[in-house]
Amino acid sequence: MSQQLDLPALLAHPANGGLRAVATPAAGAARTSAADAIRATATIPWRDVVVDSSESRLPVDGTDSLAILTVDPPLTSWQQDALIRRVRDHGYRALAVPNADVFTAGSRILAERLGLTLLHTDDPMVLAKACWQLLEGRDALTLGYVRRVAQSIEYHANGLADLLSHLSASVGHGVALIDAQGVLLQAGGTLPTEVHAAIDFGRWLDTVTGSDGAAASVRVDSPSRAGLRLTFFGTGLNTLQLSALAVAAEVAMPVVAARILIDEVADVNDAAVASGLLRDFLEQRDSRDAELEQRMLDSGWRTTGYHLGFRIIGRTRVDTFQLLRFVTRELAALPVDSHAATSGRGVTGWLSFSAPPAPSQVENYVTALRGLHAAARRAFNVAAGIGSLESGSAGLVATIDGASDAARIAANRSATGWFVRIDTLGLEQLLLSWTENDTFVPAAESLLAPLITRAPDLLETLTAYLDHESGIAATADALGLHRNTVSTRIARAQELLGLDLSDPEVRLAVHLACRAVRS
């Protein structure tokens, strides 16, 4: 035979005739768990499979083979013991029969002691076909998996997660969409961490086997999402099954890639609609629009109750749609009604409560949002602001406005981790609003004109220097510059402006002007 057969691989076969173990030699020897006993039997693979309607018709030379009988075992214990002894005397290592549960406890112990594995099967002929595929029918095994993939594609899928569920149910193994960091979506089981870590993300096709399971994966050719792999996984899979599953993964991959693109187009459209709805709501302020309120309700946005707004903005250019996807995924883990939408160069969101939350609850949610911002900073260069707790429709506008102010302040606050809560601000918030009026902005631009037109790098350094309370070391750390460079630039900026920054009033005026111009 070109292949050998073992129990874990046969149990992993999706069409094995309802096979399950009733008694295994390893269980009798060590009284281990069923799973450990089944794994132990893999060390003694079966070299052949014999199918017949009666034990008396089985070939006498069944050395290290699996015997499959198409009839039920006898009901009396002495006849069962006799059957087990004759099968084992002929050299067979395993016996599969329908209704194997009728074997008595004594007969099962006898089988374990003699080294014979007892198996139950709902359909002996289906089991025999599975054995043939694993022993000789490699092409048939592969074709069977491919046919199952094709059948799953015929069903309408409501999104990527639903598609993976169809694939898992049809193929009979776990299915996962993964990247190098972890599992993004999975169905039909949990991909073991050890198996994920062993996958080579640089290869087109890859098969791996570990102590907790095995997997066959293929790179997903998606124009919008790099580094993805489609993975079929399970326990007990042998090299032949992994090779067949790798082909099945290649067949399924284009459908998964297309589904990713379809879902992303839909998500982009939904994000655009939500962004427009948020803009319309903020622009109406205190006026009431029944149609707008109905649109908000249709989107699940409740204006009644209490709200805590937040705003996350890019300190440099960021992909706001990808930022929104990240924020939405993180918000889903919070046990509170939450919403988010793209807005300008960032994401605006809020948490809603039907009843006023206790101060401790508010603090807990602020801490959670701080953690969300910290996680976002690992992939995006962003700052975050948190508004105050407000109530009603007007309160939702107010908390979002406060969060927006705090985010703009946070964009220049490395000392606070680029995170500011509006409740911790007082005079600075008032000054921020004042510096954005139509009178102050032109005056600020005139004051800083020598830097704006001739040395924008000096303006950036001066702004950071004043934001960090005239600290050379802190400014250098924030900008990634040497301290001597910062000192030289500040001296040059004073020279171009013709001002003395040691004067507190001058320093405050220049600071406000920098804020106005940079905003």
Image (cartoon, helix red, strand yellow):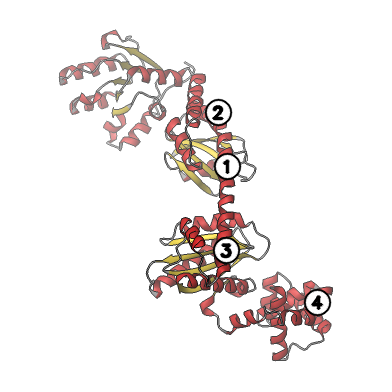
Dot 1: within a 10 Å radius of its alpha carbon, few (fewer than 14), some, or many (20 or more) residues? some
Q: Residue at x 28, y 17 (%)?
A: 88
Q: Quadrant of residue 127?
A: top left
Mark 4, mark 1: which one is toward the viewer?
A: 1
Dots 3, 4 in contact, CB < 8 A: no
Tag 1, which secondary structure? helix
Label 3, on which residue? Answer: 280
CA–CA distance in space, label 2 to label 4: 63 Å
Compare residues 321 and 334 and report the one nearer the observer. 321
Residue 228 coordinates in the image, percent (x, y): 58, 43
Mark 3, mark 1: which one is toward the viewer?
A: 3
The disc at residue 247 is 2
2 or 3: tag closer to the N-terminus: 2
- Type of amino acid at the residue the image marks with label 2: Val
Mark 1, mark 2: which one is toward the viewer?
A: 1
Dot 2: within a 10 Å radius of its alpha carbon, few (fewer than 14), some, or many (20 or more) residues? some
1 or 2: tag closer to the N-terminus: 2
The disc at residue 262 is 1
Tag 4, which secondary structure? helix
Label 4, on which residue? Answer: 451
Residue 41 coordinates in the image, percent (x, y): 36, 29
- Type of amino acid at the residue the image marks with label 3: Asp
- Type of amino acid at the residue the image marks with label 4: Leu
Residue 499 coordinates in the image, percent (x, y): 79, 87
Q: Residue at x 48, y 26 (%)?
A: 145
